[in-house]
Amino acid sequence: MNKLLENEKGKKAMLLGNEAIIRGALESGVQFVSTYPGTPASEIGNNFFALQKELKDDPKFLFEFSSNEKTAMEAAIGANFSGLKSLVAMKNFGLNVALEPLLPLAYTGTRAPMVIFLADDPSCHSSAQSEENTRPFSVLSHLPMLEPADAQECKDFTMEAFDISEKFGTAVIIRITTRVAHQRALVELGELDPNRKINLKGEFVKNKRKYVTMMPRLHEMKKEMLEREEKLEQYFEKSKLNRVEGIVKGKKQPLGIITSSVSYLHMQEAMGELGIGLPVLKLGTFHPLPEKKIKDFIKGLKKVLVVEEMEPYLERRVQMLAKDTNCKLQIHGVDLRTQVGEMKPEIAANMIAKFTGKKYAMPKFAPKFELPARPPQLCPGCPYWLVFAAVKKAVDENKVIFGGDIGCYMIGALPPHELYDYMFCMGSGIGIAHGIKKSTDQKVIAFIGDATFFHSGIEGLLNAVYNGSNPLIIIMNNDITAMTGHQPHPDSADAPRPIPIENMVLACGVKPENMKIIDQGQSEEFIATVKEFTEKPEVSVIIARRPCKFVAKKE
């Protein structure tokens, strides 16, 4: 039996932070789960997918890998409006895609409890586009955001999020980072009754006043949203998610620390190493902030240190609150650290040492000898090796612009390939190729994976055909979402209802004579087709079809 289905209340299990999120959702009786795979959130979908197979004879929830994060958000909203307790999960960049349906959801509110799970990736361990910090999206959307610090909090905060959602009729965001998602720790389990009957059939009850976001009702909805937000702030003032530690009764402390998420753990470790004990306000809610609790904490302090990762959003809010109270307070944080990269114990220790005037030498991690550089490489036997080799033989690299996209083939930007001239975000390779072709006479070849094509490449292809440019698009069709853990996509063999990529390409308006499906192992044919298609006056598409080595191995 899967460890996530253990039903011994009080038992402790070693879980990843992501697994603890799942356990919290299961204990809360989640009924519908949707996601698009993206690290560091991938384990959410992978585990629900595995549990769905294990529970196929007695399903406890509905689960789907959606085609992208926007469709995942919309599916969860639809299930929620039908009365099902819903969870939607994605990585930080996924929220950019899902933002359009998210903002109206804040206006309508929810019918059943709903949790939105976001996983940020400071230091870009798994994502190279940017160090996107999703915290401000909670302010923009007026939705509450919780930030667990460890695996136990991941489970507990998830359950609390479902409770808050039910109590206030709003979706609740849980935001974690890579270090929280992938830390492993003992988690105390609650009750999970394997015999409980969970109704997986909802009913959409028509209510235009609630679900139709149109004027003049829209302004009423916004007012209701702001009222919910105000009530949530009052609720968070008393919530155990926000707590003060290290206060010694009768002893006036001149210094204090405000922190949240995994930075709290780094701060604890640092104070232990330095032998320092200071009052700490540990915030579990980023939005709405418990402003009164913060004001009460900083009252009487001479200096406060805000320990957080990347942009100083929390620090700026503390500065505003201190100004509101005419508090003569020195506030430190970003002046003692960099905004680049994640928080680490040694960075937290260095900050606290400078803050308290204690000596501390940053450890040196440089190896005693030089190690040869080893950049990431494609797996041995990966079909992408054949694609890159054939393209390099077919065209003069100096006379062609090469566009990359997001997936395993990102590695084409690195040695020994060093092929791409630009690479931005999911699906943008085709869209940017079109813009270059419309504004120059240069030849452009854009590479995109099959999963990425379904995620957000279709729109770019449709636009290129519609607006009459002529890049060559090479779709790397390896039958799986390989980079994030081999999840299915709409053209995968194990998709609920497979949709062939070639059908979508033709549906976007690409002429049949401008599309070709080739096994890239047919080197001479592949090279000849690249040469031919780069001269086409219209959009052309090569579908390079050969399964991922790991998919082929399973077969």
Image: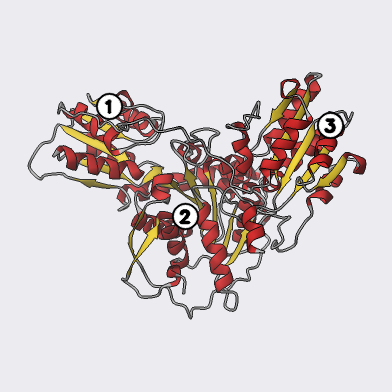
Query: Does the residue at mark 3 contact the one at mark 2 (Cβ under 8 Å)?
Result: no
Q: Quadrant of residue 437?
A: top right
The amino acid marked with disc number 2 is Phe
Neighbourhood count class around disc 1 (C-alpha, 10 Å): few under 14, some 14–19, many 20 upward? many
The amino acid marked with disc number 1 is His
Foreground of the two, 387 or 47:
387
In this figure, which residue is indicated by the disc labeled 3? 531
In the rendered view, would you say 489 is above or below 440?
Answer: below
In this figure, which residue is indicated by the disc labeled 1? 332
Q: x, y (%) of residue 258? A: 28, 37
The amino acid marked with disc number 3 is Lys
In the rendered view, would you say 320 is above or below 271?
Answer: above
In the rendered view, would you say 372 is above or below 110?
Answer: above
In this figure, which residue is indicated by the disc labeled 2? 168
SS for callout 3 = helix
Disc with the residue nearer the chain's start (3 vs 2) = 2
